Image: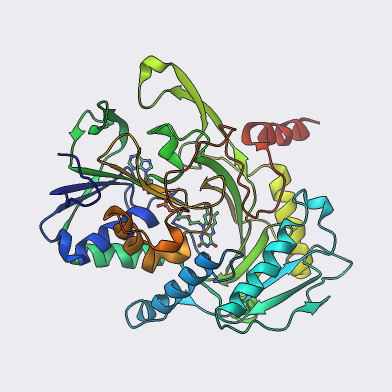
Amino acid sequence: MAAAAEEIPKSVLILGSGVFGLSTAYSLTQNPKFANTSITLVDRSVFPAPDGASIDSSRIVRPDYADLPYARLAIEAQARWRNEWWGQQDVYHEPGLAVVVNKDESDNGNGDLGRKYMTDSMANVERCGLKPGKKSEGAATGKGGSSVGDFGYVNWRSGWADAEKGMRVLRARVEKTNRVNFLHASISRLQFSNDAVTGCETDDGKLLTADLIVLATGAWTPALLDLRGRCSATGQILSYIQITDAEQAALGDRPTLLNESSGLFIIPPVNNVLKVARHGYGYCNPTTIPHPEDASLGKITVSLPRTHISHPGLEIPEEGKKALRSFLAAVYPSLATRPFLNTRICWYTDTPRGDWLLSYHPRYKNLFVATGGSGHAYKFLPVVGDKIVDCLLGEPPAEFKDKWAWPERDVEDQVWTKDWRGGVKGMVLEEELKKGENKAKL
Ligand SMILES: Cc1cc2nc3c(=O)[nH]c(=O)nc-3n(C[C@H](O)[C@H](O)[C@H](O)COP(=O)(O)OP(=O)(O)OC[C@H]3O[C@@H](n4cnc5c(N)ncnc54)[C@H](O)[C@@H]3O)c2cc1C
């Protein structure tokens, strides 16, 4: 019944149809070792999940990583984004990425993390044989000493992807294989024996079973498995602004702008909508739930998503609005007062080092966990499924063997990643939302 790494399971049940789950399903269909394996992909949302991390207008695709193995893997992914199949899907665009930092990072609360990240990324990009544009002092500074950034470089071999479209075309590609059974169901609980997962309970009272369970439920994963000190949901802010045809024509082909001191970034607009967002420490949302593996152990508190689907009308906190607004004003002064068309809190699954978690569970032998995207997994959509299947087969890429392995539990239950981020560490969503309410009452 249980699937050790070297055994080929007769049935695989993948929970979650985001980047990790969907790409795993596709890669399994392409791997001859799994030719006789039945594959089921379950998601609680009708595809595409409106609050899934993988679904949005755009995601940055950059090899600009301070960590060399991820830089190399991103280059491998880009080769596929540009290749015959992905290259024909009109998903990936390559107008470049301008990476900037502020001269003084002290008010960003992240020390010189952003500057170090930028310098190391640039070195890695060069090490990988790419030629970033010259590092330029002051070139990115906006009017009035704004927070656009003071110096940085452009990598003309970076780009962005239409995230939702990328997921849609991959989904259609998976459907075409006729190998995957798609199920619309919400998993309320995994059933555990001492050393295995014996079934997955759905909200409507069904029990799903398989030789191998792949848990890829993104930021909701800590509701199904005790991941304290290993994975936490952190809420990240996004805003969208309506622009005119003329503005779309003027801005559409510009490089993405990413300030690595503040984490704020602007991706080129699509269909007259400009996106301003922040790659930050985000907000945690502490939620007390029965211990997901054994209710007799009492309750635990973990950070879980709160989204516009679970909480209709949810807006981003005032501090987030202010940060996005001031970056927009600095970069595009003519758009400074344009109202937000929409805002959204989107949830990362953060890990202590920013490494993904792609590993069998050390205790439950037929449970493979594929999560921990840490805000940077989308760009790997064309390759990550293959890597997950390598890990399933007990053959992780050598340079990622330790990074993706089951991690030690961090000292703190709530993970505030040590990976590079902008913004303030330690914000609690509820508290930040209340600050806005109180201000409104004054
Ligand atoms: C705001 C934001 C900006 C980002 N920007 C970038 C970027 O520029 N570049 C980049 O490379 N990456 C970026 N990322 C990261 C990237 O998008 C994520 O790492 C990746 O999408 C995570 O995929 P996932 O499969 O883990 O999660 P998800 O896409 O969230 O998938 C999880 C799925 O599980 C389903 N699910 C959850 N619970 C259950 C349940 N109980 N039962 C059944 N189904 C369930 C959900 O409906 C969902 O479809 C960003 C992420 C966010 C949030």
**For the point 66% across and 74% down, which residue is it?**
122
Q: Give the answer, above or below, for where 41 lies relative to 270.
A: above
Q: Which colouring convention does the figure follow? A: rainbow
Image quadrant holding the N terminus, namely top left
Q: What's the residue at 19%, 32% (across, down)?
A: 207
Judged left or right of residue 404, residue 415 is right
State the image coordinates of residue 263 (x, y, percent, origin top left). Answer: 68, 57
Looking at this view, name the residue that lies furthest to the right: 144
Q: Which of the two residues, 185 or 296, is positioned nearer the viewer here?
A: 296
Side of 236 relative to 387 (left or right): right
Count numbered badges in the picture: 0
**In the rendered image of this protein, does residue 436 appear above or below residue 160?**
above
Does residue 260 appear anywhere in the picture?
no
Q: Quadrant of residue 395?
A: bottom left
Q: Residue at x 89, y 67 (%)?
A: 144
Residue at 50 percent across and 63 percent down: it is: 57
Tell me where residue 314 appears, x and y as whole percent: 57, 40
Residue 50 horizontal side relative to residue 433, left or right: left
- Image quarter in which the C terminus is found: top right
Coordinates of residue 114 in the picture (x, y in percent)? 72, 60
Using the rendered view, name the quadrant where residue 153 is placed. bottom right
Where in the figure is residue 105, as x and y percent of width and height? Answer: 81, 57
Q: Is residue 409 left or right of residue 174?
A: right
